[in-house]
Amino acid sequence: MKRSIQHPASSIQVNLGDRSYGIIFGDSHRTIKPHLYRDACIITDKNVAKYHLRPWEELFPLAQTMILPAGEKTKSMKTMSLVYDFLAQIGFGRDHLIIALGGGVVGDIAGFAAATYMRGVEYIQIPTTLLAMVDASIGGKTGVDLTLGKNLVGAFHQPKAVLVDFNYLKTLPRREWNNGLGEIYKYALLTGEIELSQIPLQFDYRQRAFSKNYSKIVRFCAQYKAGLVSQDERDVGGIRMVLNLGHTFGHAFEAGAGFKALKHGEAVVLGLMGAVFISYKRNLLNKKTFDKIIDELSKFNIPKITRVFQFMELLTYILRDKKTASHNFRMVLLKDIGKPIVVHDIIVREFRKACGFISNTFGIETKD
Ligand SMILES: NC(=O)c1ccc[n+]([C@@H]2O[C@H](COP(=O)([O-])OP(=O)(O)OC[C@H]3O[C@@H](n4cnc5c(N)ncnc54)[C@H](O)[C@@H]3O)[C@@H](O)[C@H]2O)c1
Ligand SMILES: [Zn+2]
C-alpha cells in the first residue's frame, strides 16, 4: 500500500520524486493519521520519553516503544543490534511505521533501523532538539558511529515526513540549545542570510522559547537544507557537500573527545573556526571578514575540556572521515560569507596550523 502523509501548503517540501515529503511545522500530534499504519514502533531516548512520549503512545495505542539511553555513545552498532532484536520480538512488519522521537541521535539510529530492517520500512522524524530541527532530521542520512570515527556506517533513507513542533524545545536543557547554534552558524556562513551577531541573542532561556524572528531562522535553515537535498540527495553532485562546512575538524574533535566531552554542535563550531582559518590563510577570505567571523564564533560557549588532544590522532580522524576523498584532502572553505567553495588539495601543514588556531582560541590543549 502506498501511503502519503498530507501536509499543508505552509510546509517545506523535500522534492525527490516519489520519495518526496514535507517538513511540517506546528502541532505534531495533529499531523499524523494513525489509521494509515496498522501499528508503530516509537524509538526515543530516556530524556525525551520523560516529557514527550505519552501523547504519542495515546495516539498509537498499539505502538511498542523502545527507550534508548541518551547521548552520542548510544549511536553505535551495539544499539542497532538491540533495536533489530526489539523489532523482531514485537513482530514489526513492513506495514508498520517507525516513529523517531528525539534529537539527532535517535533520528540517526531509528532512521538506520528503518533503512535496513526488512530491507527498508517507513519512518517519520519528530525532532525534539534545535539541532535536529535545523539539520539532522532532514535529508535521509542515517547511521551510527564506530569508535574509529563518526557516522562511518549508515544508509540513505528518506522519512515519510518531518514534524517540527517548537513546543518540544520547552524542555530542552540550556546546553542543548547552544548545541543547536553550531549548525545555525554553519547555515549563516554558508548563506549569508542570517546575521551572525543575531544567532545567540534571541533565546529566552527562562521561557524556553524563541522569538518569532528566530522561528524564521529555523525555518530558513530547514528550507536551505531541503533545497540542497532535493538537488543532490546522495551527496555525490558536490551540492549537498557544502553542508560539511565545519565538519572535517568538527568530527575529529568530537571523536577525539570520545563522543562525550564535546557535543556535535559544539564540535562544529571548532570545525568552522578551522575552515575559516584555512580560508583566510589561503587568501580566500579577507582579514575584515575573517576577524568578524572569529569574533562571533569565539563568543561561543565551549565547555572546559581537560583532555589533551594529540594532533596525529586528530589527523587520523580527519583522514578517516568520509569527507576526505581517497587521495586528496577535501574540505569546504569560504570565499566570503555566503560563498562556500570545495577544495581538494589541503595539506597536512594546513590542518596542523588550523588545529593550533582552534586550540589557542578555546584554550584546548593539543600536542604533536
Ligand atoms: N543525519 C544527519 O543529516 C545529521 C545532521 C546533523 C547531525 N546529525 C547527528 O545528530 C546528532 C546530534 O543530535 P542532537 O544534538 O540532537 O543530540 P541528541 O539526540 O543526543 O540530543 C541531545 C540531548 O538532548 C536530549 N533531548 C532531546 N530532546 C529533548 C527535549 N525536547 N527535552 C529535553 N531533552 C531533550 C537528549 O536526550 C540528549 O541528551 C549527532 O550524532 C550528529 O552526528 C545527523
Ligand atoms: Zn552536523
Image: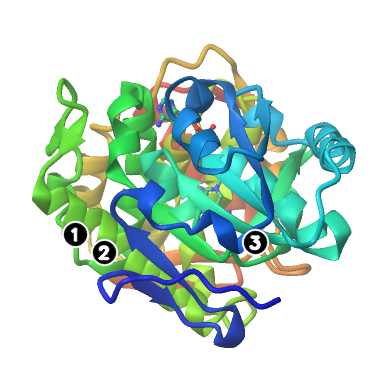
Ligand 2 neighbours mark 1 (CB distance < 8 Å): no
Residue lying at 77% horizontally and 69% vertically, measured from the top left = 327
Q: Can you tell which mark lies on residue 194?
A: 1
Would residue 345 be found to the left or right of residue 226 on screen? right
Residue lying at 28% horizontally and 53% vertically, measured from the top left = 26
Would residue 189 be found to the left or right of residue 307 on screen? left
Residue 58 coordinates in the image, percent (x, y): 50, 35
Indicate the amino acid at tag 1.
Ile
Position of 348 relative to 168 (above/below): below
- Whichever of labels 3 and 2 marks the residue nearer the N terminus, that label is 2
- Whichever of labels 1 and 2 marks the residue nearer the N terminus, that label is 1
Quadrant into which the C terminus falls: top right
Residue 181 coordinates in the image, percent (x, y): 32, 42
Marks 3/2: CA–CA distance: 25 Å
Quadrant into which the N terminus falls: bottom right
Mark whose residue sits in front, 1 or 2: 2
Would residue 291 be found to the left or right of residue 268 on screen? left
Position of 83 relative to 310 (above/below): below
Indicate the amino acid at tag 3.
Lys
